[in-house]
Image (cartoon, grey):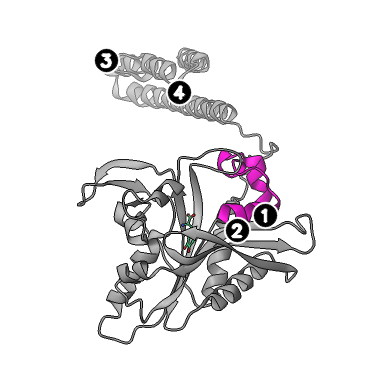
Amino acid sequence: MTTELDSIVGSARDAFAKAATPADLENAKAQFLGKSGRVTELMKGMAQLSVEEKKTRGAAINVAKQAIESALNERRQALADQELEAQLKAEALDVSLPGRLREPGGLHPVSLTMERIEQIFASMGFDVADGPEVESDWHSFTSLNNPPNHPARSMQDTFYVDIKGDDGIPYNLRPHTSPMQVRYAQAHVKKYEGREMPEVRVIAPGRTYRVDSDATHSPMFHQCEGLWLGENVSFKDLKVVFLDFCRTFFETDDLQLRFRPSFFPFTEPSAEIDIQFQSGPLAGKWLEVAGSGQVHPNVVRNMGLDPEKFIGFAFGMGPDRLTMLRYGVNDLRLFFDGDIRFLRQFR
Ligand code: DAH
């Protein structure tokens, strides 16, 4: 009898060992411990035995059953371990592999210039204003003393959009930041209505658009407008402010300024502002950096101010150009190509 039970336990062990998967193992278990498994059959076979025989036989069968169960559990554990090991192997990480470097980002060179311009003018008491890039005809031109059919309109090749304003004239992609002079001054007047109004002192940096494209022109470019209006603001103040700005921006006192007579509809008189470095790679050349002038009385009127009382100057400069001069870049298009090899040099 012992040998019979031993051989059942032995063949259970063999069957469990052969089971390669948990499902195989459960099938093998059924053969021994299931409803009609071999151990269960043995139990059923005890029915005819005497009470004494039942005791010894039952105990022996239980020992065998426990041996089979513990063999089963051992195999279950072994299979689970195997599975885990296979999974770990499949998901193996090579911790010696160098990680993928994520380079730190940085500001675009033109953004660096914009921030610099804002900081310098803010330190001189100028407000910094933002305005719409899709602009009405009145703001871009008419309010700036440049009415429809005026020849000065052809100074700028303007993009128009398919939306018409109340005046029936299409909106445009602003060709300059000058409309911000009027927008800001109007808002300023409104803000201080009925109170004593401080001088209007503002810069308005931003994107501008023209039908223009070559090494020094891009259809999208940047401008920064400046406006200073008060009861006693003159060209002398413009010269001081602009010279101070240029010397701070380029970090040199070795720099001269020159006003060259020019024409803009929104200023009278008007001047181009040129600068000249006295040393360095650009020394000796006059470089045009801004348009400027005394704000035209018609523009002052359109701002909602009395031109008999308010006088001052405006200027418009090109931050792209300033960036090229500051860093010695000779092709404007590099700023807009998005080539990381170029851009990372400014990080
Ligand atoms: N808006 C002019 C341009 O785009 C630049 C300019 C000239 C702005 C004279 C001004 C100014 O404010 O007074 O060419």
- State the separation of the CA atoms marked 3 and 2: 116 Å
Q: Are marks 2 and 1 in contact (CB under 8 Å)?
A: yes
Seen from the viewer's position, the closer of residues 135 and 169 is 169
Q: Name the residue under label 1.
A: 325
Q: Which one is earlier in the sequence, the residue at label 2 or at label 1? A: 2
Callout 1: helix, strand or loop? helix
Please state the horizontal and vertical placement of residue 344, each as a whole percent of the image.
65, 47
For discs 3 and 2, the disc positioned in front in the rendered view: 2
| Residue position marked by numbered label 3 in the rendering | 48
In this picture, is 3 found above or below 253?
above
Relative height, residue 328 to residue 30 (above, below): below
Q: Name the residue under label 4.
A: 68
What residue lies at 75% left-to-right and 55% top-to-bottom?
282
Element type at marker 2?
strand
Crowd around label 4: few <14 · some 14–19 · many ≥20 (10 Å): many
Q: Earlier in the sequence, mark 1 or mark 4?
A: 4
Q: Indicate the amino acid at tag 3.
A: Gln
Which callout, 4 or 3, points at the residue further toward the start of the chain? 3
The residue at label 4 has a CB less than 8 Å from ligand 1:
no
Which quadrant of the view contains residue 85?
Answer: top right
- Between disc 4 and disc 3, the foreground one is 4
Q: Could you tell me residue 168's position as x and y percent?
A: 21, 47
